[in-house]
Amino acid sequence: QLDAITRGSILYGNASGATARLAKGGAGTVLTSDGTDISWTAAGGGAGMEFIASSGAISNSGSVEFTGFDASKYDSYTLFLMNVLPATDYAGLSMRVSVDGGSNYLSASNSYSASVSQWTALGDVNAMPIAYHQAGNSSVADGGVSGTVNILGAALNVPTIISPVTGVMQGNGLPGIIAVSAKTKAATVVNAVQVFFHTGNISSGEITFFGIVKE
């Protein structure tokens, strides 16, 4: 068996208890077991959270976009925000969605509806608030916006809902966290998102993008 082994192959005991060779798996596969035998299978199989993309270190950008949506693989997504700091003091972080892969983002005055904790309605809006409190722009005293944004039902032809849970260091130096909920007014399949401050650029921070794998 060793004399004839090929690159990437492994030796294992087969059903007869004899030594056998298992050829290497294809790209993106992992070795698994069904409790009896071993085999190669696609990596990331089964439900769970899967990394898609990262903004990297943001440096004075007008917005951050993510377009790696895959309706065949994910129904919902999560953004992780790490110290996303505005260039302009006291700026609110928001998100818009796209239905054409990021060529355009919905921005009409009635594209979305939103509310904050205790069912305080914000009414129709042109962007979905990620953080209701506005963030300060001092990386030391303020700290920007950190938290998660769940994008629910993006692959379904229903109104897409976002459910952010974020902590904000406000422009007055005080921490703030309020539950926010927003949705698209129309039933649509979302395939890209854009994150931005309502005024000024994103000075710094990082955002990572994960998909929730279908079962």
Image (spheres, grey):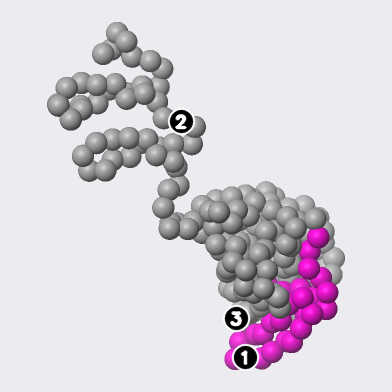
Residue 128 is marked as: none
Q: Which of marks 1 and 3 is nearer the N terminus?
A: 1
Residue 114 colored in magenta in the image: yes
The CA distance from mark 1 to mark 3 is: 10 Å
Residue at 65% of width from left, 51% of height from top?
68
**Residue 106 visible at all:** yes
Q: Which of marks 2 and 3 is nearer the N terminus?
A: 2
Q: Earlier in the sequence, mark 2 or mark 1?
A: 2
Q: Residues within 10 Å of mark 3 (few under 14, many from 20)?
A: some
- The image shows residue 141 at horizontal and vertical percentages of 70, 69
122 to the left or right of 149: right
Q: Do the residues labelled 2 and 1 touch (CB within 8 Å)?
A: no
Q: Which residue is more in the foreground, 195 or 110? A: 110
- The image shows residue 198 at horizontal and vertical percentages of 81, 71
The CA distance from mark 2 to mark 1 is: 51 Å
Residue at 32% of width from left, 10% of height from top?
4
- The image shows residue 157 at horizontal and vertical percentages of 62, 68
Q: Which amino acid does label 1 sit on?
A: Trp
Location of the N terminus (image quadrant): top left
Residue 181: quarter of image: bottom right
Name the residue tied to disc 3. 179
- The image shows residue 137 at horizontal and vertical percentages of 77, 67
Name the residue tied to disc 2. 26
The magenta span reads 104-131
The kind of secondary structure element at disc 3 is: loop
Residue 119 is marked as: 1
Q: In this view, does 103 lie above or below 113?
A: above
